[in-house]
C-alpha cells in the first residue's frame, strides 16, 4: 500500500541502533569520572477541556532536570496542524520529536486528501507510533482540536492507549488539576468561564506540585481560529531587588592620580564582509 | 488486615476490570464496568467503554493493558470486516474469537490482554468464547473475567441457569457486575451491557447510582 507519509519507514519493534553508541559513551564518561546527562523531564501539569465553541488547552512552563529547573519558560503546547494542538508531558525530547513527526506526517496526509486534518487522524497516528515503541517513548499527550465534526479532546498515554473525554489532565500535577475540573466542570461552558477554569487547574498544579511551575500558557481553538496565549498568566513573577550593592563615587578616598597616555598608531586595517543573504 | 496486592504487572493504563458474558434462551448478554486505572491508585478514566463492537452481531469485552487491548481490537475489527467482505456473509462468532486468539497467541510475549467474545450467528446461534492471556480459546455458556471476577465466582455458579429469559439474564448480569464493582477497587463506574439476539443489538447503560444494591449498602 503506497503512502505519502515518510519521515521514518515503519519497522516493527524498538530500534536498537543507538544502544551500542550509548554504552560506549557511558564507558568513556565513567573513565573520566562523570556520568551521562539524565534525560530532561518536563514534570508537568497539562490539561484540556471542551467548551461550547471549541477546545481549550493549558500548560505550565517549567522544565526540570532532576531537582533543578532547566527552563523557566518552555513551551509545552505544540503545533500539530492549523486546527489541532497538542500538550506534552513526560520526557521533553520525546514529546517534542513525537509531535513534530506527527505534525509533518499529518501535513503530507492533508495535502494528499485535500482536506483539513481531523483530530481522530492525529490521535491514530500518535497512538500507533507510541504502541509500536511499547512505552519506551515517554510521551503523555493531551491532543485537542476542532475539525469538520466539531471539537475533540483526547488523552494519549506513553504505552499507546487513548481516551476521548470532555476534560483531561496529564503530568505530575494532573491530580491537582483534575480536582479543579471534577469540582467545576459543566458541559457547554462559555469561553471566559472555561478559560478561567483551565487557568485555575494549571495554577493548582503549579502551586501544589514541585515539578510544575512558572507561567500558564493557554491555547483556545475554535472553528477557524486559534488563540495561542503565551503567557496567559504570569503566576510567578521574578521579584525586584530592593537593595543596591553599587558603591557611590567618592566612597573610597583618592590619594594620588597619575595619567600616562599610550601613543599607538594604526598599522593595518582590513575589512571582511560576511555573506548575510 | 492483609494488604491487597495490586494485580498490576500491567504497565501503563490497565483496564483492571469486571467483564462477563452469558447466554440465554435466544441470545447473549455481554457486559462490563467502565473504569480504567493506573497502578491500582489513580482512576484515569471513569467512563471507558470496554464492550467493543467488532461486527454487527459480535461484541468483545477487553481486560488487561488498555493499550494492548485497543491495538488488538482495532486489528481484529479490520480483519473481520475484510473477512466478511471476502466471504460475502456475516462472520461467525468463532471467527471473531479466532482472530483475537491468533493475535494473542502469536504475540503472547509482548501482549497483556484478555478478551471475551460474544455474539449471534446463523450457524450456531448465541455463543460466548473466552480468549485468555496466553491465547487459549474456549467456548462456554457463561464466562466472567478481569480482576473483579474473582469476587463473583460463587454468585455466578449459584445463580446461573442455562435457559433464562432475556430479562432474567439481564438482571443476573447486572447483579453480578454490581457485586464485583462493590468489592473490587479497580472496577467501577457505570455498567455497560449489550443484549445480542437474531433481531438485533440493544445497548443498556446503567449509571452507578441506579445499580442494584445489596444488604450492606
Image: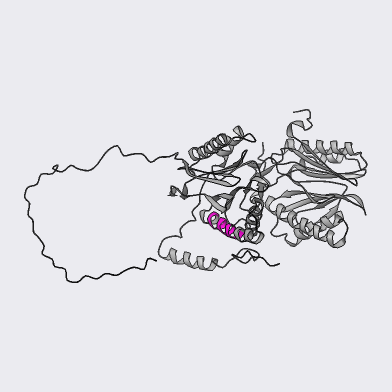
A157 left or right, relative to A239: right
B207 left or right, relative to A186: right
Find residue B94 and report its image quarter. bottom right
Residue B41 placement (x, y as % from top left): 63, 41
In which quadrant will I find the N terminus of chain B? top right
Majority secondary structure in the magenta region: helix
Find residue B159 and report its image quarter. top right
Residue A135 placement (x, y as % from top left): 61, 55
B72 left or right, relative to A90: right
- Please state which of residues A222 and B157 is positioned toward the viewer in this rendering: A222
Q: Say which residue appears at 29% left-offset and 37% top-offset.
A: A242
- Please state which of residues A8 and A122 is positioned toward the viewer in this rendering: A122
Residue A57 placement (x, y as % from top left): 56, 44
- Please state which of residues A270 and B113 is positioned toward the viewer in this rendering: A270
Image position of B205 with respect to A77: above or below:
above
- Magenta part of the chain: A95-105
Residue A111 placement (x, y as % from top left): 62, 60
Image position of A124 with respect to A25: above or below:
above
Question: Is residue A133 visible to us here?
Answer: no
Question: Is residue A27 visible to us here?
Answer: yes
Find residue B83 and report its image quarter. bottom right
- In the rendered image, residue A273 lying in the magenta stretch gets the answer no
Image position of B217 with respect to A222: above or below:
above
Amino acid at each position: 500500500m503506497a503512502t505519502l507519509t515518510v519521515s521514518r519507514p515503519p519497522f516493527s519493534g524498538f530500534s536498537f541502533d543507538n544502544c551500542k553508541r550509548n554504552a560506549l559513551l557511558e564507558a568513556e564518561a565513567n573513565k573520566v569520572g562523570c556520568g551521562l546527562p539524565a534525560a530532561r523531564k518536563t514534570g508537568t501539569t497539562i490539561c484540556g477541556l471542551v467548551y461550547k465553541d471549541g477546545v481549550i488547552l493549558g500548560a505550565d512552563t517549567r522544565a526540570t532536570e532532576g531537582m533543578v529547573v532547566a527552563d523557566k519558560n518552555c513551551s509545552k503546547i505544540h503545533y500539530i496542524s492549523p486546527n489541532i494542538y497538542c500538550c506534552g508531558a513526560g520526557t521533553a525530547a520525546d514529546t517534542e520529536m513525537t509531535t513534530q513527526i506527527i505534525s509533518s506526517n499529518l501535513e503530507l496526509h492533508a495535502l494528499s486528501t485535500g482536506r483539513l486534518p481531523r483530530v481522530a487522524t492525529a490521535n491514530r497516528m500518535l497512538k500507533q507510533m507510541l504502541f509500536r515503541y511499547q512505552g519506551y517513548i515517554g510521551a503523555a499527550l493531551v491532543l485537542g482540536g476542532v475539525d469538520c465534526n466539531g471539537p475533540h479532546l483526547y488523552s494519549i498515554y506513553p504505552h499507546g492507549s487513548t481516551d476521548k473525554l470532555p476534560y483531561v489532565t496529564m503530568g505530575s500535577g494532573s491530580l491537582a488539576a483534575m480536582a479543579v475540573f471534577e469540582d467545576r466542570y459543566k458541559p457547554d461552558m462559555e469561553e471566559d468561564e472555561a478559560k478561567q477554569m483551565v487557568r485555575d487547574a494549571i495554577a493548582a498544579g503549579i502551586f501544589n506540585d514541585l515539578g510544575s511551575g512558572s507561567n500558564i500558557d493557554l491555547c483556545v481553538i475554535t472553528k477557524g481560529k486559534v488563540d495561542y496565549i503565551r503567557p496567559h498568566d504570569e503566576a510567578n513573577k521574578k521579584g525586584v531587588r530592593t537593595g543596591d550593592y553599587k558603591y557611590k563615587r567618592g566612597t573610597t578616598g583618592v590619594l594620588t592620580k597619575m595619567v600616562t597616555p599610550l601613543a599607538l598608531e594604526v598599522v593595518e586595517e582590513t575589512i571582511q564582509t560576511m555573506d548575510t543573504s | 488486615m492483609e494488604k491487597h496486592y495490586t494485580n498490576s504487572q500491567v504497565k501503563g493504563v490497565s483496564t483492571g476490570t469486571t467483564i462477563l458474558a452469558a447466554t440465554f434462551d435466544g441470545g447473549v448478554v455481554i457486559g462490563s464496568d467502565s473504569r480504567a486505572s493506573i497502578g491500582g491508585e489513580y482512576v484515569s478514566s471513569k467512563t471507558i467503554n470496554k464492550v467493543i463492537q467488532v461486527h454487527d452481531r459480535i461484541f468483545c469485552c477487553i481486560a488487561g493493558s488498555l493499550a494492548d487491548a485497543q491495538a488488538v481490537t482495532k486489528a481484529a475489527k479490520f480483519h473481520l470486516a475484510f473477512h466478511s467482505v471476502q466471504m460475502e456473509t456475516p462472520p461467525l462468532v468463532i471467527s471473531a474469537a479466532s482472530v483475537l486468539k491468533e493475535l494473542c497467541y502469536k504475540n503472547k510475549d509482548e501482549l497483556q490482554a484478555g478478551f471475551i467474545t460474544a455474539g449471534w450467528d446463523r450457524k450456531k446461534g448465541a455463543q460466548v468464547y473466552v480468549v485468555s492471556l496466553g491465547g487459549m480459546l474456549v467456548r462456554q455458556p457463561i464466562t466472567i473475567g478481569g480482576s473483579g471476577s474473582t469476587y463473583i465466582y460463587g454468585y455466578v455458579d449459584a445463580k446461573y441457569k442455562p435457559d433464562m429469559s432475556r430479562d432474567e439474564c439481564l438482571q443476573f448480569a447486572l447483579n453480578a457486575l454490581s457485586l464485583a464493582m462493590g468489592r473490587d477497587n479497580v472496577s467501577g463506574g457505570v455498567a455497560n451491557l449489550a443484549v445480542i439476539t437474531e433481531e438485533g443489538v440493544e445497548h443498556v447503560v446503567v449509571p452507578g447510582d441506579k445499580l442494584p444494591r445489596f444488604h450492606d449498602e
